[in-house]
Image: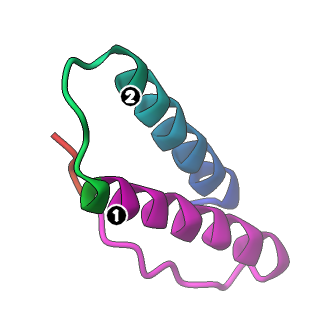
Amino acid sequence: MRAKDHKKKAADLLATLSHWINYSKFDYNLQDLSTLLDEVKDRYTDYIELKSNPEHESKIEHKSYK
């Protein structure tokens, strides 16, 4: 993935989380929120790393939050 793809994915995950926290009829498990926020941090870290080092290898596992 390109640097800007990691940044966009981080922003998309935050936007999705915000939407569902506002509109869902149930409360999220704190462990699930923590996992999602950790992925956002990892994505943004990869964005920063790839901007300064184009050879940086991302170690993010692709997950589904369905």
Report the residue marked by disc 1. Answer: 35
Q: Position of residue 7 (x, y in %)?
A: 65, 51
Q: Amino acid at mark 1?
A: Thr
Q: Position of residue 43 (x, y in %)?
A: 55, 63
Label 2 to label 1: alpha-carbon separation:
15 Å
Q: Position of residue 42 (x, y in %)?
A: 53, 70
Identity of the residue drawn at 27% across and 62% down: 31
Q: If the image is split into quadrants, where does the C terminus sit? A: top left
Identity of the residue drawn at 38% across and 28% down: 21
Identity of the residue drawn at 47% across and 58% down: 37
Q: Is residue 10 left or right of residue 3?
A: left
Report the residue marked by disc 2. Answer: 21
Q: Which range of residues does the magenta coloring cover?
A: 33-62
- Classed neighbour count for the residue bearing mark 2: other residues with Cα under 10 Å, few (<14), some (14–19), many (≥20): few
Q: At numbered mark 2, what does the secondary structure look like: helix, strand or loop? A: helix
Q: Nearer the viewer, residue 35 or 27?
A: 27
Q: Is the residue 1 above or below the residue 10 in the image?
A: below
Identity of the residue drawn at 35% across and 53% down: 33
